[in-house]
Amino acid sequence: MLSLDYRHNLQFDFLTPDVCQKLSDYLDSESGKFMSYELANAIEIPYERVNELIFALGFHGVLDVELLIYHVICSDAPIASRPIESGFPSLPYECENCGTEVIEPTELEYCLQAKTISKVRFI
Ligand SMILES: [Zn+2]
C-alpha cells in the first residue's frame, strides 16, 4: 500500500478530499485496464485534467500507463499500444491495421489506458 500526500505530491487544484475518496474507490474497484475517460466520468473531473492526473499517478508507481494509438481514417479501434515511457510515435508511422504510411499528425489520435499496480491511500 502506497501513501501519497496528494497536496504535496500531486498538486492538482481539483483534488479535494471528496475527489480523492472517489479516486481511491475507483482504483480499488477497478482490477482491469481502464481508459482515461472512464476515470474522468467516475471522479467527475474534466477529461483533459484526468490525463495529467494519470501521468502523475504513473510517475508515482500507482498506475501502469499505456498510450493507445488510433489511425482515425481506418478504424475506430486502437491500432497499437505502447508504454507511456516510449512517448508518442514518430512520423512517418506505419499503421499496423491498414499498412498505410501515416505522414499527417492529424491522422493519429491517442488515448491513455491504465491499470492499477499498487493500492494507494491518499493522505
Ligand atoms: Zn490505418
Image (tube, helix red, strand yellow):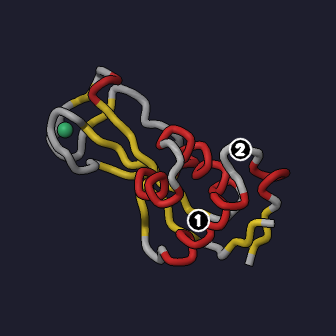
> Residue drawn at (71%, 44%), measured in percent from left and top?
12
- Disc 2 crowd rating (10 Å Cα; few below 14, some 14-19, many 20+) is some
Helix, strand or loop under label 1: helix
Q: Relative to the observer, which residue lies in front, 41 or 78?
A: 41
Helix, strand or loop under label 2: loop
Q: Relative to the observer, which residue lies in front, 89 or 121?
A: 121
> Which residue is under mark 2?
12
As shown in the figure, which amino acid type bears the numbered disc 1?
Lys
As shown in the figure, which amino acid type bears the numbered disc 2?
Phe
* Position above or below: 94 against 33: above
Report the quarter where the C terminus lies. bottom right
> Which residue is under mark 1?
22
Mark number, residue 70: none
Residue 120 visible within the image: yes
State the image coordinates of residue 68 (x, y, percent, origin top left). 38, 49
> Residue drawn at (22%, 35%), measured in percent from left and top?
72
Can you tell me whether the CB of the residue at mark 1 lies under 8 Å from the nearest atom of ligand 1?
Answer: no
Q: Relative to the observer, which residue lies in front, 59 or 25?
A: 25
> Residue drawn at (22%, 50%), measured in percent from left and top?
77
State the image coordinates of residue 3 (x, y, percent, origin top left). 79, 70
Left/right placement of residue 111 relative to residue 55 reads left
Q: Are marks 1 and 2 in contact (CB under 8 Å)?
A: no
Residue 113 image-quadrant placement: bottom left
State the image coordinates of residue 103 (x, y, percent, origin top left). 29, 22
Residue 86 visible within the image: no
Q: Looking at the image, in which quadrant does ligand 1 appear? A: top left
State the image coordinates of residue 46 (x, y, percent, origin top left). 50, 42
Report the quarter where the N terminus lies. bottom right
* Position above or below: 12 against 73: below
Can you tell me whether the CB of the residue at mark 2 lies under 8 Å from the nearest atom of ligand 1?
Answer: no
Q: How many labels does the image show?
A: 2
> Residue drawn at (62%, 69%), measured in percent from left and top?
24
